[in-house]
Image (cartoon, rainbow, N blue to C red):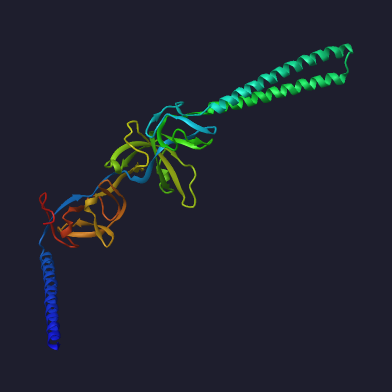
Amino acid sequence: MASKKRKAIIIVAVVALVLAGIVGYRIYSNMQTGKERAARVSQGQAVAVEVAAVTRRDITPVLTFSSNLEPVWNADISSKVDGRIDKLTVDEGDSVSAGMTIAVLDMGELSAQVIQAEGSLLQAKANLEQAELDFRRMETLAKQGAVSTQTLDSARTKRDLAGGQVRAAEGAMALYDSKLTGATVTAPRGGVVVKRFLQPGFYTKAGSSIVTVADISTLLAKATVGEAEITQLKQGASVKVKVDALGNQEFTGSITRVSPVAAMPSRTFIAEVSIPNQQNILKAGMFAKVEVPGQIHAQAIAVPETALVMKEDIKTIYVVTADNKVEQRTLTLGYVGGGWAEVVDGVKEGEKIVIAGQNKLRDGSTVRLGAPGEAGK
């Protein structure tokens, strides 16, 4: 048993030594390769690069905001009265126009109540007519001294009470007429039925949603904007809207409203962008990116984004000196986007910079102008 354990220990030791040798060889090989590369650079071997002169150009910053698309208008449609749904004329996805009938409630009980109210009104009018005749008769007799003033006052009071009963009956009649009209549920505005809550035969309460209708002929993108950016947004300005779900397809919208007061404590504003949707390509709820052009930075010093090199999270650039060597400089940048970077400090107009082949360079490397496609070799 002891001999087997010793053999196992020896085998493990041999394997460990072999692995350590392989790792050591790889490290040594990489170090030698690095030394050879450094030696070639130090010997002045020129690296082929592409260069361009630093120029001035107009930079248009683009502010990008994320938002969900919303209908320009939507509402839950309900009845004004309680009742059982007799007919429901629409389903989800159906288009409706303003005034179109959406549902009809069972009107049997309401119709009976209307007839009863009509009868009460006719009776009240008859009572008023009789009271008016009695008052006129008493008024004539009072002038002749045939009846007392008290009798005349009593007739006047009865007439006035009868008039009040007529007014009450008219109010009841108008109420039941309104309820009867409310039993027919109509669309207040054109749109599309996006949700149906009830089926025919269901009992609905006044104010309970039957369907939801939304106008999606125009969609809204509501962007949250910081106070530092709000001054660059102008009502009526044209903007671009890109929708990820449609392959980043681009649409044109306009800023229709900017909230006049900031939301606290974040100090942000809401900008509403309207996007026409006559062809119904866009759907409410889609995620969209709104791109708003900012104020133009006229004739700013700019370099191609491809020329930028990251050095410990700092953006730098290689500038070609008179002796065909490169100097790596740290840049202070403004707006970066659209393939260009605005330079606040770090390079001057007319200086030559490396725009391709930077992967083989370091500060002080010798470079030469390479043919197209040769940069970095």
| Residue 33 x %, y % | 11, 68
The answer to whether 307 appears left or right of 192 in the picture is left
| The one of 69 and 37 positioned closer to us in this rendering | 69
User: Splitting the image into 4 quarters, where does residue 131 fall?
Assistant: top right
Q: Is residue 233 above or below residue 354?
A: above
Residue at image coords 10%, 50%: 371
* Figure label count: 0
| Residue 357 x %, y % | 16, 55
User: Splitting the image into 4 quarters, where does residue 152 fall?
Assistant: top right
Residue at image coords 30%, 43%: 245
Image quarter hosting the N terminus: bottom left
The answer to whether 24 appears left or right of 190 in the picture is left
| Residue 228 x %, y % | 42, 49
Image quarter hosting the C terminus: bottom left
| The one of 371 and 164 positioned closer to us in this rendering | 164
| Residue 200 x %, y % | 45, 33
Point out the residue furthest to the right here.
145
Residue at image coords 78%, 21%: 158
Q: Is residue 219 above or below residue 354?
A: above
Q: Is residue 332 above or below residue 209?
A: below
